[in-house]
Image: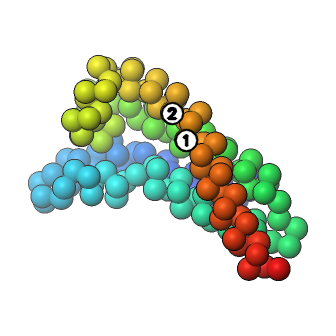
Amino acid sequence: MNRTVLILGGFAAAAAIGRLFTPRVFAPIGLPTFLGSVLVSVSVVLLIGLGVLFYREGRNPNGRYLNAAGRFAILAAWCELLVIGGILMSEHLHLHSYYTGPFETVERMFPNPAAHAIGHAQGFWIRTPFLLIVGAIVYTASRRKRD
Protein backbone atom coordinates (compact mmCIF):
# COMPACT_ATOMS: atom_id res chain seq x y z
CA MET A 1 0.00 0.00 0.00
CA ASN A 2 1.15 3.51 -0.72
CA ARG A 3 2.89 5.30 2.18
CA THR A 4 0.82 8.43 1.53
CA VAL A 5 -2.41 6.46 2.01
CA LEU A 6 -1.09 5.05 5.29
CA ILE A 7 -0.13 8.51 6.56
CA LEU A 8 -3.50 9.98 5.55
CA GLY A 9 -5.23 6.99 7.13
CA GLY A 10 -3.35 7.69 10.36
CA PHE A 11 -4.47 11.33 10.32
CA ALA A 12 -8.04 10.16 9.66
CA ALA A 13 -7.84 7.77 12.64
CA ALA A 14 -6.55 10.59 14.86
CA ALA A 15 -9.42 12.83 13.70
CA ALA A 16 -11.91 10.01 14.30
CA ILE A 17 -10.70 9.55 17.87
CA GLY A 18 -10.68 13.30 18.39
CA ARG A 19 -14.32 13.52 17.36
CA LEU A 20 -15.22 11.31 20.32
CA PHE A 21 -13.79 13.61 22.97
CA THR A 22 -13.28 17.14 21.66
CA PRO A 23 -16.84 18.42 22.25
CA ARG A 24 -16.00 18.38 25.98
CA VAL A 25 -12.89 20.44 25.27
CA PHE A 26 -14.34 22.87 22.74
CA ALA A 27 -17.69 23.62 24.43
CA PRO A 28 -16.26 25.29 27.57
CA ILE A 29 -14.14 27.68 25.50
CA GLY A 30 -17.16 28.69 23.43
CA LEU A 31 -16.07 27.24 20.09
CA PRO A 32 -19.11 26.90 17.79
CA THR A 33 -20.25 23.34 17.18
CA PHE A 34 -19.73 23.58 13.42
CA LEU A 35 -16.15 24.82 13.76
CA GLY A 36 -15.30 22.20 16.36
CA SER A 37 -16.70 19.49 14.14
CA VAL A 38 -14.68 20.69 11.14
CA LEU A 39 -11.45 20.87 13.16
CA VAL A 40 -11.62 17.13 13.86
CA SER A 41 -13.27 16.04 10.63
CA VAL A 42 -12.49 12.75 8.92
CA SER A 43 -14.09 14.24 5.79
CA VAL A 44 -11.58 17.09 5.73
CA VAL A 45 -8.74 14.54 5.87
CA LEU A 46 -10.42 12.64 3.02
CA LEU A 47 -10.70 15.78 0.87
CA ILE A 48 -7.06 16.67 1.52
CA GLY A 49 -6.19 13.09 0.60
CA LEU A 50 -8.14 13.42 -2.63
CA GLY A 51 -6.12 16.46 -3.63
CA VAL A 52 -2.78 14.97 -2.63
CA LEU A 53 -3.30 11.55 -4.23
CA PHE A 54 -4.66 12.75 -7.56
CA TYR A 55 -2.30 15.73 -7.85
CA ARG A 56 0.81 13.63 -7.15
CA GLU A 57 -0.28 10.91 -9.56
CA GLY A 58 -0.99 13.49 -12.26
CA ARG A 59 2.44 15.08 -11.81
CA ASN A 60 4.24 11.73 -11.91
CA PRO A 61 5.48 10.92 -15.46
CA ASN A 62 4.40 7.29 -14.96
CA GLY A 63 1.24 8.25 -13.08
CA ARG A 64 -2.12 6.69 -13.88
CA TYR A 65 -5.59 7.81 -12.88
CA LEU A 66 -6.55 4.27 -11.87
CA ASN A 67 -3.64 4.12 -9.41
CA ALA A 68 -4.85 7.27 -7.68
CA ALA A 69 -8.48 6.12 -7.85
CA GLY A 70 -7.66 2.78 -6.24
CA ARG A 71 -5.68 4.40 -3.45
CA PHE A 72 -8.39 6.97 -2.90
CA ALA A 73 -11.10 4.29 -2.76
CA ILE A 74 -9.12 2.48 -0.05
CA LEU A 75 -8.74 5.71 1.91
CA ALA A 76 -12.44 6.55 1.46
CA ALA A 77 -13.50 3.11 2.71
CA TRP A 78 -11.19 3.42 5.73
CA CYS A 79 -12.58 6.88 6.55
CA GLU A 80 -16.15 5.62 6.27
CA LEU A 81 -15.39 2.68 8.56
CA LEU A 82 -13.92 5.10 11.09
CA VAL A 83 -17.03 7.29 11.00
CA ILE A 84 -19.43 4.35 11.27
CA GLY A 85 -17.34 2.92 14.10
CA GLY A 86 -17.38 6.29 15.86
CA ILE A 87 -21.16 6.52 15.59
CA LEU A 88 -21.66 3.03 16.99
CA MET A 89 -19.01 3.48 19.69
CA SER A 90 -20.61 6.73 20.83
CA GLU A 91 -23.91 4.91 21.19
CA HIS A 92 -22.39 1.96 23.02
CA LEU A 93 -20.39 4.12 25.45
CA HIS A 94 -23.18 6.73 25.82
CA LEU A 95 -20.83 9.52 24.77
CA HIS A 96 -22.04 12.89 23.61
CA SER A 97 -19.67 13.39 20.69
CA TYR A 98 -19.68 14.92 17.24
CA TYR A 99 -20.85 11.50 16.02
CA THR A 100 -24.09 11.61 18.00
CA GLY A 101 -25.45 14.49 16.02
CA PRO A 102 -24.47 17.87 17.38
CA PHE A 103 -26.63 19.23 14.62
CA GLU A 104 -30.40 19.02 14.89
CA THR A 105 -30.63 17.89 11.27
CA VAL A 106 -28.84 14.62 12.07
CA GLU A 107 -31.17 13.94 14.97
CA ARG A 108 -34.23 14.60 12.77
CA MET A 109 -33.01 12.50 9.84
CA PHE A 110 -31.89 9.48 11.83
CA PRO A 111 -34.05 8.20 14.70
CA ASN A 112 -31.17 6.29 16.28
CA PRO A 113 -27.40 5.81 15.88
CA ALA A 114 -27.82 2.53 13.98
CA ALA A 115 -29.87 4.35 11.33
CA HIS A 116 -27.22 7.09 11.25
CA ALA A 117 -24.50 4.47 10.65
CA ILE A 118 -26.55 2.81 7.90
CA GLY A 119 -27.08 6.22 6.30
CA HIS A 120 -23.32 6.72 6.20
CA ALA A 121 -22.80 3.28 4.65
CA GLN A 122 -25.36 4.06 1.95
CA GLY A 123 -23.91 7.53 1.39
CA PHE A 124 -20.47 6.03 0.76
CA TRP A 125 -21.72 4.57 -2.53
CA ILE A 126 -22.92 8.00 -3.65
CA ARG A 127 -20.05 10.15 -2.35
CA THR A 128 -17.17 8.01 -3.58
CA PRO A 129 -18.06 8.04 -7.32
CA PHE A 130 -18.68 11.79 -7.10
CA LEU A 131 -15.30 12.32 -5.41
CA LEU A 132 -13.62 10.13 -8.04
CA ILE A 133 -14.97 12.52 -10.67
CA VAL A 134 -13.54 15.45 -8.69
CA GLY A 135 -10.29 13.49 -8.49
CA ALA A 136 -10.31 13.10 -12.26
CA ILE A 137 -10.48 16.87 -12.60
CA VAL A 138 -7.55 17.31 -10.20
CA TYR A 139 -5.60 14.58 -12.00
CA THR A 140 -6.25 16.12 -15.44
CA ALA A 141 -5.30 19.63 -14.29
CA SER A 142 -2.06 18.42 -12.69
CA ARG A 143 -1.26 16.28 -15.74
CA ARG A 144 -1.59 19.31 -18.02
CA LYS A 145 0.92 21.19 -15.86
CA ARG A 146 3.29 18.25 -16.26
CA ASP A 147 3.11 18.15 -20.07
Describe residue 66's horizontal placement relative to residue 91 as left or right. right
| Amino acid type at mark 1 | Arg
Specify the quadrant of the image occupied by residue 35.
bottom left
Name the one closer to the observer, 138 or 84: 138
Disc 1 designates what residue? 127
Q: Residues within 10 Å of mark 1 (few under 14, many from 20)?
A: few
Specify the quadrant of the image occupied by residue 89.
top left
Q: Residue furthest right?
A: 62
Name the secondary structure under disc 1: helix
Specify the quadrant of the image occupied by residue 29.
bottom left
Disc 2 designates what residue? 123
Residue 64 in view: yes
Q: Where does the image place residue 107, in percent across and percent down from the top left?
A: 25, 29
Q: Where does the image place residue 75, in percent across and percent down from the top left?
A: 62, 47
Quadrant of image for the C terminus:
bottom right
Name the one closer to the observer, 119 or 42: 119
Describe residue 36's horizontal placement relative to residue 47 as left or right. left
Q: Are marks 2 and 1 in contact (CB under 8 Å)?
A: yes
Describe residue 75's horizontal placement relative to residue 121 as left or right. right
Q: Where does the image place residue 12, in percent across and percent down from the top left?
A: 50, 51
Q: Residues within 10 Å of mark 2 (few under 14, many from 20)?
A: few
Name the secondary structure under disc 2: helix
Q: Is residue 44 above or below residue 13?
A: below
Q: Is residue 46 above or below residue 54?
A: above
| Amino acid type at mark 2 | Gly
Name the one closer to the observer, 123 or 137: 137
Residue 6 in view: no
Q: CA distance from mark 2 to mark 1?
A: 6 Å
The residue sitting at 31% across, 27% down in the picture is 109
